[in-house]
Amino acid sequence: MVLALSGCSTLWHCTDTRAERGEAGVRVQVEDTSGQPLGVTAEVVGWRLEPHPQVPFEGDRVNFHYRFDGADETSGPAVDACAVDKERVALGCLTVYPSQARLGQDDALTGDDWLTLEHPEQVTEVLLIPNDQSYNGPTCERDLKDGGGTHPPESPGAGDQL
């Protein structure tokens, strides 16, 4: 027996969109790709310029300390951290994850990281972007059938206005 269907075709209407980048701040409510709060707060609790202890001969870097309130130790949202100048132009950014932090006495996850910048002396603040960067699912280009949907915004880079 031969079964033939004529006039039928399977079309997947796959579309990729990027969420709008949220307002950067020292303390932010982390949000999902639809802009809804996840119940997690991320905060830069301090920063300073100093040589990295493992490579002091490379000069000053930005050492910043952060905390996540309401995040899980093993998973959870991630946010982009950016060192900015007085005009809030990003000089350099990286993504920080709660899993890189340690559980503190007040049940917050705290950690620190380093930003290597071309001109660290221009840094006036370290800001966090509230968009969750922990999961960026498959795109239509990679998987037409299961890809698509809203993805986190592109991570900021040097020269982006925050």
Image: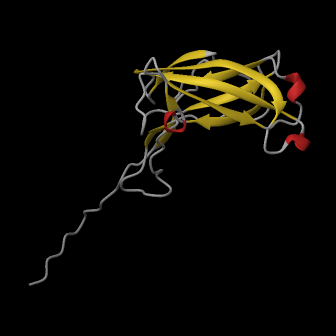
Residue 41 on image: x %, y %:
49, 19
Name the side, left or right, on which 47 lies relative to 102.
right
Residue 97 on image: x %, y %:
53, 36
Residue 19 on image: x %, y %:
51, 31
Q: 37 or 126, which lies in front?
A: 126
Name the side, left or right, on which 69 lies relative to 115.
left
Q: 127 or 139, which lies in front?
A: 127
- Asked if residue 39 is positioned above or below residue 114 in the image, the reply reads above
Residue ranking furthest to the bottom? 1
Q: 40 or 24, which lies in front?
A: 40
Residue 2 on image: x %, y %:
13, 82
Look at 55% across and 17% down and name the residue there.
28
Location of residue 92 by image quarter: top right
Q: What number of labels is visible? A: 0
Residue ranking furthest to the front? 105
- Asked if residue 40 is positioned above or below residue 9 in the image, the reply reads above
Q: 90 or 113, which lies in front?
A: 113
Location of residue 94 by image quarter: top right
Look at 61% across and 36% down and name the residue there.
95
Look at 51% across and 32% down and name the residue there.
102
Q: Quadrant of the N terminus?
A: bottom left
